[in-house]
Image (spheres, rainbow, N blue to C red):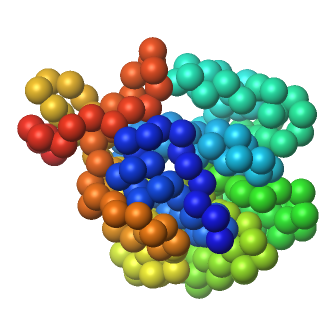
Amino acid sequence: MRVISLGIPELDRDLGGGVPHPSLISIEGEYGSGKTIFVQQVAASMLREGLRVYVISSEATVKEYLAMMRSVKLDVDSYYLSGRLNIYPLHIEGGRWTDFMSSFFLRVASTFLELKKKSYDAVIIDSLSVLTVNTPAPEFLTFVTRMKNLVSDEKSVVTTFHPEFLSEDSIMKLRASSDVYFVLKNASVSGIDVKILRIVKLWGVSGERKSAITLEINPHVGLRVMPLGGVKI
């Protein structure tokens, strides 16, 4: 296991060095809490460390995803062009969402990742909220097991999800199985909108770490750490 620096000194320090690889990393958060930007920071850091990254996005096309990363000072176009970054959007032209088809997305994504596991070192699924629509609990538990098997094959799996889309039992299973479990929430510091990153579980790092970190998304500098004092959640 190695620790991947996220490239933000204050954030690395508060996380005890960074995030572990290989590992199962789960990020829970409400709408607008910064889940996508946080995992984009993770993806950029893994690419910088020489890893090959797959992204499965339920919220953006390839062009939109790359543009989103550039907007927060994470330019990964060269990695995409060289094939070290691959982005797979769930938005398919002409596709129609139905209850019947939705139940297959999680199974198809799992099988795809298993078949392609020699082609990547880390995968980011952003987000599980869409993939788990109409998915029975046993199928979700099977998905978690299959992701843990990928970690055993020295892959990192990073997932994001909105808690309203998963049952409490499923969240507990995911939390228990994850090596890293973060919760992101919206907050306010002196009238400035910020994100609170709460560390529920973080295995595989050796340095001292905080239980909560205050983050700001600044379009001029990207993601940055702010002092915790004065936070109102």
Specify whether residue 31 is in view.
no
Q: Residue at x 14, y 24 (%)?
A: 191
Specify whether residue 76 is in view.
yes
Q: Position of residue 100 (x, y in %)?
A: 69, 63
Q: Nearer the viewer, residue 210 or 143?
A: 210
Q: Nearer the viewer, residue 16 or 24?
A: 16
- Looking at the image, residue 228 lies above or below residue 1: above
Q: In the rendered image, which quarter is residue 195 located in?
A: top left
Q: Residue at x 45, y 69 (%)?
A: 206
Q: Residue at x 58, y 81 (%)?
A: 141
- Looking at the image, residue 88 lies above or below residue 17: above
- Looking at the image, residue 74 lies above or below residue 110: above
- Looking at the image, residue 143 lies above or below residue 72: below
Instruction: Locate the N terminus and report the quarter of the image it occupies.
Output: bottom right
Residue furthest to the front: 207
Q: Nearer the viewer, residue 66 or 128?
A: 66
Left or right of 101? Residue 45 is left
Total number of numbered discs in the rendering:
0
Q: Position of residue 180 (x, y in %)?
A: 48, 67
Left or right of 119? Residue 90 is left
Left or right of 190? Residue 202 is right
Q: In the rendered image, which quarter is residue 215 located in?
A: top left
Q: Position of residue 150 (x, y in %)?
A: 74, 74
Q: In the rendered image, which quarter is residue 223 located in?
A: top left
Q: Position of residue 169 (x, y in %)?
A: 41, 81
Q: Residue at x 56, y 22 (%)?
A: 73
Instruction: Locate the C terminus and report the quarter of the image it occupies.
Output: top left
